[in-house]
Image: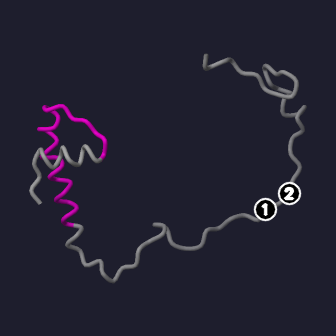
Amino acid sequence: MKVDSALVKKVAALARLEFSEGSLASFVPEFAKIISYIEKINELPLEDLSPLSHPVGGEQMLREDKVKSSLSTSDALSNAPSKKERFFTVPRVLE
């Protein structure tokens, strides 16, 4: 595949990227390398391979859910530096 600045501009527009003319000129050879790597992958015999749903095979091991008691509100707030009624208070971040 021939990679030129027109192709890079088209792909950049699809990806909603903007390049200055200077960076576009320097990215064309980089993009050509990326395309050549993809073409190498396309040369591999992959017809007999099934797609993976996850790169690590096997069964997902999950622990059994067990109901346990949790902290009471007063215990959770016992070491809070600042609290109001049943809630933690923190400094205002947004105006």
**Magenta stretch: residue 39 in it?**
yes
Across and down, in percent, residue 29 comes to 12, 46
Nearer to us in this view, 26 or 16: 16
Please give the range of residues in magenta.
15-40
Across and down, in percent, residue 76 comes to 84, 34
- Mark 2 is on which residue type? Val
Residue at image mark 2: 67
- Vertical placement of 81 versus 40: above or below? above
* Furthest-bottom residue in this view: 48
Across and down, in percent, residue 82 comes to 79, 19
Would residue 52 appear left or right of 92 to someone viewing this image?
left
- What residue is rendered at 25% in x and 43% in y? 13
Q: CA distance from mark 1 to mark 2?
A: 7 Å
- What residue is rendered at 61% in x and 20% in y? 94
Callout 1 environment at 10 Å: few (<14), some (14 to 19), or many (20+)? few
- Vertical placement of 88 versus 33: above or below? above
**Magenta stretch: residue 3 in it?**
no
- What residue is rendered at 18% in x and 43% in y? 9
Please tell me in which quadrant of the rendered image residue 28 appears. Answer: top left
Tell me which secondary structure the magenta stretch mostly adopts.
Answer: helix
Image marks 1 and 2: residues in contact by CB distance under 8 Å: yes
Nearer to us in this view, 17 or 57: 17
Classify the position of the C terminus by image quarter.
Answer: top right
Which secondary structure, mark 1?
Answer: loop
Identify the mark at residue 65; answer none if there is no mark.
1
